[in-house]
Image (cartoon, rainbow, N blue to C red):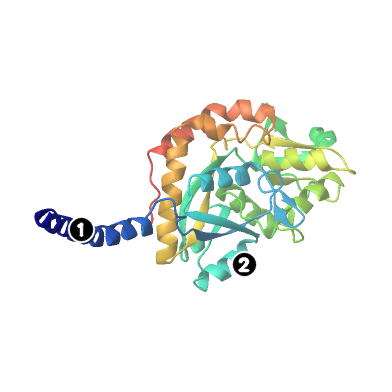
Amino acid sequence: MSGLGINCKLLRGWCFAMLCLLVPAVSAQAQSSPSEPASVETLEWTVWPLPGVINIGDGKPTDGAAMDLLRLIMSELPAFAPNYRLGNRFRQQQDMQQGQNFCSAPLFRRADSDEYGYFVPFMASTPIQLVIRRSAADEFPIENGTISLARLAERDDLRGGYSGFRTYPPAVSHWLEQAREDGRVEKATGTPSGENILRMVSLERIDYAFEFSILINTVNKHFRSGEPLRGVPIKGHRALVEAGIYCSRTPWGKRVAGELDRVIRELASDPETLLALYRPWVPEETYGLYKADLQAYYRQRASRPAVLE
């Protein structure tokens, strides 16, 4: 009996020692349990209101081709929680110059914006078009469904307008500079989206403007007065226009831009996923004309990392 008692004491001592070793290990494992929610970083976004691109409801972004794509991208980045606010180019420039950490979309690339932001190619747009009233088509030098900017420049009887808030593609921007010097176009302020310019055309206050098919299509659907608008392709300008995201030129911005670029390229490897976002917003005729170009753009984008330097 005495030998059995000694063995029991030894066994109890051994069990107590093992328990002391196991408790810290179990505690450490519990602290690192994957079931605990990981910290989520807020990603501040400034988005530009553009009909059909970034639509607004009750002062907040709702949907649109670019907004839908942004939300798809963010769904692939669970480590970030997006917070969207409305803005414009001037506010974006000022805030980024002050070193605030945020990203902004959709934007065209500009040399001055590169000074304080990292540019990430985001999505392709069908080319900008001349916007006129449908009833006024015979007044313009339209040939084979397109219009020559050189021929348009010869018409002193036609007056155009452009938005002081918007960035236009280079070819149109240069044409507008010369037309402004010649007194053939007028600068208008008003809404940052440039929607007021289209209303001016519809109400016959000016004869033409320049805009993208998504905006023309969306604004046409919501007109309650004025004449319907028509987009006319510009001769020699068939190439897609690349829009992008700017993230602040800070260590934070470079890191986030790299993450956004990675997800965009992954999504672009399946172009049909992204093209589906165009269908509700782009006119059917325009979509059919540029579908192959859009597919080619996204296939190429999948293998082209953004240059962040």
Crowd rating for badge 1 (residues with CA inside 10 Å; few <14, some 14–19, many 20+): few
Left or right of 121 on screen, residue 28? left
Q: Nearer the viewer, mark 2 or mark 1?
A: 1
The answer to whether residue 162 is left or right of residue 169 is: right
Residue visible at 68% across and 27% down in the picture: 284
User: Label 1: which residue?
Assistant: 12
The residue located at (56%, 55%) in the rendering is 82
Q: Along the polypeptide, which appears first: circle 2 or circle 1?
A: 1
Left or right: 267 with respect to 304?
right
In the foreground, 197 or 283:
283
Callout 1 secondary element: helix
Residue 120 appears in the rendering: yes
Where residue 283 is drawn, which disc sits there? none
Residue 17 coordinates in the image, percent (x, y)? 20, 61
C-alpha distance separating marks 2 and 1: 72 Å
Q: Is residue 182 above or below residue 229?
A: below
Task: List x then y, in percent, for residue 231.
Answer: 72, 37
Taking 111 as reference, is 244 above or below it? above
Name the image quarter holding the C terminus: bottom left
Q: In the image shown, does 22 or 175 lie closer to the viewer?
A: 22
Residue type at the position of mark 1: Arg
Residue type highlighted by circle 2: Arg
Q: Quadrant of residue 1?
A: bottom left
- Comparing 164 with 150, the one in front is 164
- Residue sitting at 26 percent across and 57 percent down? 22
- Residue at image mark 2: 91
- Which element is circle 2 on? helix
Residue 192 image position (x, y, % from top left)? 70, 58
- Residue at x 37% of width, y 56% of height: 30
